[in-house]
Amino acid sequence: MDIELIELFPNSIKFILSDVTLAFANAIRRTALAEVPSLTIEDVYVLKNTSPLFDEFIAHRLGLIPLKFDIDALELNFRDECDCGGIGCNLCTVTLTLSKETDAQTSTVVYSSDLISTQAGVEPISSVIPIVKLGPNQALELECMAQLGKGKEHAKWQPVSAMGYQAFPIPTIDKEKCTNCLACIDACYRGVYQKTGDKVQIANPLNCTLCDYCLEVCEPNAITIGKDSTKVIFSFETNGGLDPSTTLTKSGELIIAKIDEFKKTLESTLAEEKES
Ligand SMILES: [Zn+2]
């Protein structure tokens, strides 16, 4: 297996994965979406709310604010596996508080930056996510409990917001058939082809999404789009809570743990079968 990095940003990654099957790529995708944990507000205690929005509406908004955290440094337990029995303690819960009010002359917007975390390193990924607008003489006072969760329980815990892969594209132009009509350049919205002099050339083959629009407009049938079935182009964005490399590493660790568990279960089942 080989990994070739195409691009890496704080919240997104694109790479080529070689010598794998699509099923393996799908295992990574499904594990990252459903099994890699992230931290999100789950319970909200409303102490005072005279804003225009009712409590449940505000709680729903708070649950959708991604929280930045260091998954290894924080060492949080899942609440349902914690020694506290699921009540919530500082080993499984991070508390965030919010308190804002206006006087008779002012109105203001309550933003995610108004959430004050009691745990260092835990904070909303953006300071300007609006929660509610307070008019004159209105107030909002809350205590929020954030906990680890998995995407398979609720989508708000998915650490990635867009994750996909595709077969490795190999677009080619038959120079003998190509009339350089340039129709493929207009048809391809990903900029795979470009005009060089008076000829069409393939400029960005990895941008090809296998949509086949270029094949439809190429009257001389000069273009073919092949696929390398041993390679996939993998790309995804995170919601900002975990960085892309941590998300991938955790995904790999969880797959290995599941395979180890499967191996142990299989060995004990076969041993029991032999004894009987
Ligand atoms: Zn606990």
Image: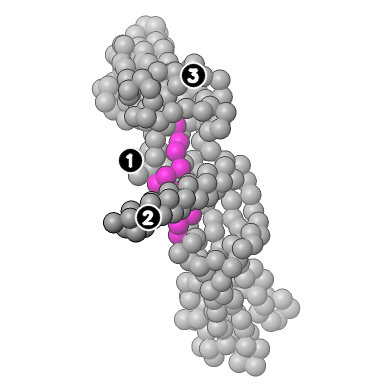
Residue occupying the point 53% across, 38% down: 242
Query: In 3D space, how far apart are the residues under numbered discs 3 and 2 (Cα atoms)?
Result: 51 Å
| Residue 65, quarter of picture | top left
Q: Is residue 133 above or below residue 186?
A: above
| Residue 56, quarter of picture | top left
Indicate which disc, 1 or 3, sits on the residue closer to the N terminus: 3
The amino acid type found where label 2 is placed reads Ala
Whole-percent x, y for residue 20 in the image: 55, 66
Whole-percent x, y for residue 26 in the image: 45, 59
Would residue 209 be visible to someone looking at this image?
no
**Residue farthest to the front, as pictured:** 275
Q: Crowdedness of circle 2 by 10 Å Cα count: few (<14), some, many (20+)?
A: few
Is 55 on the left-hand or right-hand side of 174?
left
Which of pointers 1 and 3 indicates the residue nearer the eye?
1
SS majority, magenta: helix
Magenta highlight on residue 144: no
What secondary structure is marked by label 3? strand
Residue occupying the point 59% across, 68% down: 19
For label 2, the residue is 271
Quadrant of image for the C terminus? bottom left
Q: Which residues are magenta?
A: 26-39
Whole-percent x, y for residue 39 in the image: 44, 32
Which of pointers 3 and 2 indicates the residue nearer the eye?
2
The amino acid type found where label 1 is placed reads Glu
Q: Which mark is residue 153?
A: 1
Quadrant of image for the N terminus? bottom right
The amino acid type found where label 3 is placed reads Ser
Please tell me which residue lies in front, 33 or 218.
33
Q: Which mark is residue 117?
A: 3
Indicate which disc, 3 or 2, sits on the residue closer to the N terminus: 3
